[in-house]
Amino acid sequence: MGGPGPGTNGSPVPEQARFCARCDGPVGRGRGGRPGPERGTCPWCGAAYDVRPDLAVDAEVTGGAGERYRVRAPLARGARGWSYTATRTSDGALVVLGRLEGPDGPAAGALAVEETEVLLALDVPGLVRARDVVRADGRDGPVRLLVLDHVPGEPLSAHRPCPPAEALDAVLGAVGPIAALHRHGLLHADLNPSNLLRGPGGITVLDLGSVRRVEDRHSDVWATTGFVAPEIHPGGPGPSVASEVFALGRTVAVLVAEFDHLRHHALRLPDPAAHPVLRDDPGLVALLARATDVDPARRHRSVEAFAEEARRVRAGYDGPDTTDTAGTDRYTARPGDCGVGVGVGAGADPEDGPTRRGGSRPVGAARDTRDARGAAIP
């Protein structure tokens, strides 16, 4: 006897979070007290849309070595589609299945698929562990998903704004795993507050679906509006270590100050005079201004160099910082097997929506399950 079909389980995506993946227009909105449809045709560009999860609850999927996983529930809908919580059938461990493909098919996620073997071999403290790759029959055809450890905690986006010392501590905790990725010739390529999780053991860097090689200048970029460096937009050289520094600087800024980081200030900091937390700390402003400079050459040369200046700024605040007497980060806990997993979850900031930069692909932006505000990077 067949079970429920893909997309029939799980809470629906809120209407205010439904946007067309091609033109970014609102879709699936109700009128006259009637609920909006979860699938249909975009009234703005005519593209088909479907915001339902494409895997059913209780569906079983198989990994590369024959390991099987049972889908528990949809977790989040991001740029490449849905991610899910699942149970590994061999031992009952809770995992996350993160989508490796985008809404335009396998080519949209090729950058992540190409790096899968490298990711599976990494065991970096503070970086969510990738365990396996699964293939499944989704509602609209085959899908590939990366199996990740399920990590306890909450994303930084769930508690903002926060004091500068807290924001600096958190971002400093992410520098170690990010630097380790760079040493392996990889970029995370989607650093933002929703992908940094604070748990019992410290900070864990989440969501490896956008990871790419440092030298890759051709694959699509899946990134998050408000944290995308200018050089990643059309005509620029694309992601680099400098764009990771930019994203860290933006993350600190968004954590400490309330400003329109998605539109009016998507590429620049707000006026410090309008924000006491910035007005009263020129050292913090100088750190953020350098990290988010429009010219990549004027930014910190590495995430470690960014951290060095950030620690000096952090030392100006009361309370413990994130370094021990040897000057190394303390927030380097290894991911666990339970809790909140990848990227944007239930506690994520509703404004942290993913965006895409691709070669000749249609303009569009996929959305998170909350009221995200993204912008396409064609």
Image (cartoon, rainbow, N blue to C red):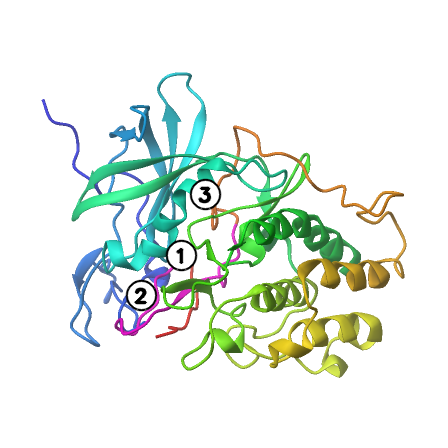
Q: Is residue 79 above or below residue 76?
A: below
Q: In which image quadrant can residue 308 be found? A: bottom right
Q: Is residue 118 visible?
A: yes
Q: Is residue 71 left or right of residue 258?
A: left
Q: Of tags 3 and 2, which is closer to the observer?
A: 3
Q: Is residue 354 visible?
A: no
Residue type at the position of mark 1: Asp
Residue on which disc 2 sits: 19
Q: Which secondary structure lies at badge 1?
A: loop
**Secondary structure character of the magenta stretch overall:** loop
Q: Residue at x 88, y 58 (%)?
A: 315
- The location of residue 215, given as percent across then percent down, is 47, 63
- Taking depth in this image into account, of 127 and 250 the one nearest to the observer is 127
Question: Reading the chain from its start, which is encountered first: label 1 or label 2?
Answer: 2
Query: Label 3 belongs to which residue?
Result: 118
Query: Mark 2 packing: few (<14 Cα in 10 Å), some, or many (20+)?
Result: many
- The answer to whether marks 3 and 1 mark residues whose Cβ atoms lie closer than 8 Å is no
Query: What is the crowding at mark 3: few (fewer than 14 residues within 10 Å), some, or many (at least 20)?
Result: few
- Asked if residue 375 lies left or right of residue 135, the reply is right
- Please say whether residue 225 is one of the residues in the magenta stretch: no
Do residues under tags 1 and 2 come within 8 Å of each other at their CB atoms?
Answer: no
In this picture, which residue range is highlighted in magenta?
Answer: 348-367
State which quarter of the image contains the C terminus.
Answer: bottom left
Residue 342 lies, in percent from the top left, at 47, 44
Residue farthest to the top?
Answer: 91
Foreground tag (3 vs 1): 3
